[in-house]
Image (cartoon, helix red, strand yellow):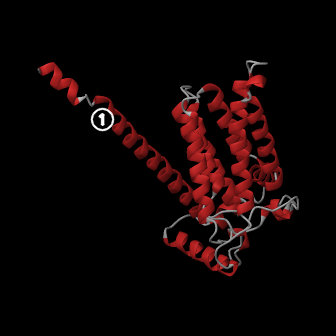
């Protein structure tokens, strides 16, 4: 797990590369400075966003004492909504240690590299679609951080559910790492893992023209299963992330339509003096 300090250092170094690449004398020495300077800038934004996510997890605007009652409320709300019990789902996988350990590793390391790879692919192959997806990631992550200032405990910390903390059981817990600020254990709502997976799937399905692109829809479903089986998130954490992603995409589309409408109206306006002079 990359600490927020290292993430911000990397972001700072990449910003230096970006600035250097835009110096005229430097840019004139190599044609590739323009491309790699742009890559460095976008990578700096990504690492900076990741560092902010890690750092902000250390703060709450409410007392942590309410985290368990809120988690208990989510647990009871799921039963009222007839969602399957996280405990019953987890018990299907507990007899298979290798699967559980793979799920723990999946939760720990895959979400950020896959998101980064997706953004690199968009930037390199579909530059026209990159800005909108990048903005979706930034908006979703930013709003999620604001919501996570209200502490909510993950299901593995909720007593009386029968859930097992699988990462602790196999010595794979990311919260026992001491390289800096750890991701906040009380920032379960919404699930950023699920939200990022949904954005990756959306990007691949809407941008790619391959007949295999629909397989990307399995990525957020697998991520939701992993975060539930490892007892890091409730079903509702993932559902909330999905609602938030849809809301962000909807707002982006509305803003684009308004902007496009204003642009088209301004392009259709003709000078009044010109019309009068032609008629005369």
Q: Residue at x 62, y 25 (%)?
A: 125
Total marks placed: 1
Question: In the rendered image, is residue 93 in sight?
Answer: no
Q: Residue at x 78, y 35 (%)?
A: 17
Estimate the x, y position of residue 252 in percent, counting from the top left.
Answer: 47, 46
Which residue of the protein is positioned furthest toward the left in this rendering?
A: 280
Estimate the x, y position of residue 84 in percent, counting from the top left.
Answer: 57, 64
Q: Is residue 179 left or right of residue 197?
A: right
Q: Residue at x 69, y 59 (%)?
A: 229
Q: Is residue 113 above or below residue 207?
A: below
> Depth check: 280 or 74 in front?
280
Estimate the x, y position of residue 171 in percent, counting from the top left.
Answer: 88, 60
Q: Is residue 162 above or below residue 238?
A: below
Q: Is residue 147 above or below residue 61?
A: above
In what quadrant of the picture does the C terminus appear?
top left
Question: In the rendered image, is residue 271 in sight?
Answer: yes
> Depth check: 165 or 253 in front?
253
Estimate the x, y position of residue 182 in percent, counting from the top left.
Answer: 80, 62
Q: Residue at x 57, y 40 (%)?
A: 133
What residue would you read off at disc 1? Answer: 265
Q: Is residue 156 left or right of residue 234?
A: right
SS category of the residue bearing label 1: helix
Query: Label 1: few (<14), some or many (≥20) within 10 Å?
Result: few
> Depth check: 242 or 37 in front?
37
Query: In the figure, residue 37 lies in which quadrant?
Result: top right
Query: In the figure, residue 268 lies in which quadrant?
Result: top left
């Amino acid at each position: 797990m990359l600490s927020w300090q290292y993430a911000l250092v990397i972001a700072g170094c990449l910003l230096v590369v970006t600035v250097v690449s835009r110096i005229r004398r430097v840019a004139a020495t190599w044609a590739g400075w323009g491309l790699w300077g742009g890559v460095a800038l976008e990578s700096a934004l990504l690492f900076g966003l990741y560092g902010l996510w890690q750092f902000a997890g250390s703060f709450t605007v409410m007392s942590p004492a309410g985290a368990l009652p809120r988690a208990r409320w989510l647990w009871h709300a799921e039963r009222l909504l007839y969602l399957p019990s996280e405990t019953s789902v987890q018990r299907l996988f507990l007899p298979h240690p290798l699967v559980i350990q793979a799920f723990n590793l999946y939760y720990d390391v895959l979400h950020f590299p896959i998101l980064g790879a997706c953004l690199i692919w968009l930037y390199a192959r579909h530059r026209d679609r990159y800005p909108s997806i990048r903005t979706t990631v930034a908006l979703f992550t930013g709003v999620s951080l604001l919501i996570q200032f209200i502490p909510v405990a993950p299901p593995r910390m909720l007593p009386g559910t029968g859930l097992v903390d699988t990462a602790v059981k196999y010595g794979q817990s990311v919260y026992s790492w001491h390289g800096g600020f750890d991701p906040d254990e009380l920032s379960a709502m919404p699930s950023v893992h699920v939200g990022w997976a949904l954005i990756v799937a959306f990007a691949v399905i809407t941008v790619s023209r391959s007949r295999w692109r629909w397989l990307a829809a399995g990525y957020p479903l697998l991520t939701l299963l992993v975060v539930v089986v490892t007892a890091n998130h409730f079903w509702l954490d993932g559902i909330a992330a999905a609602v938030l992603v849809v809301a962000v995409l909807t707002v982006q589309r509305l803003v684009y339509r308004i902007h496009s409408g204003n642009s088209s109206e301004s392009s259709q306006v003709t000078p009044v003096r010109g019309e009068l002079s032609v008629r005369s």
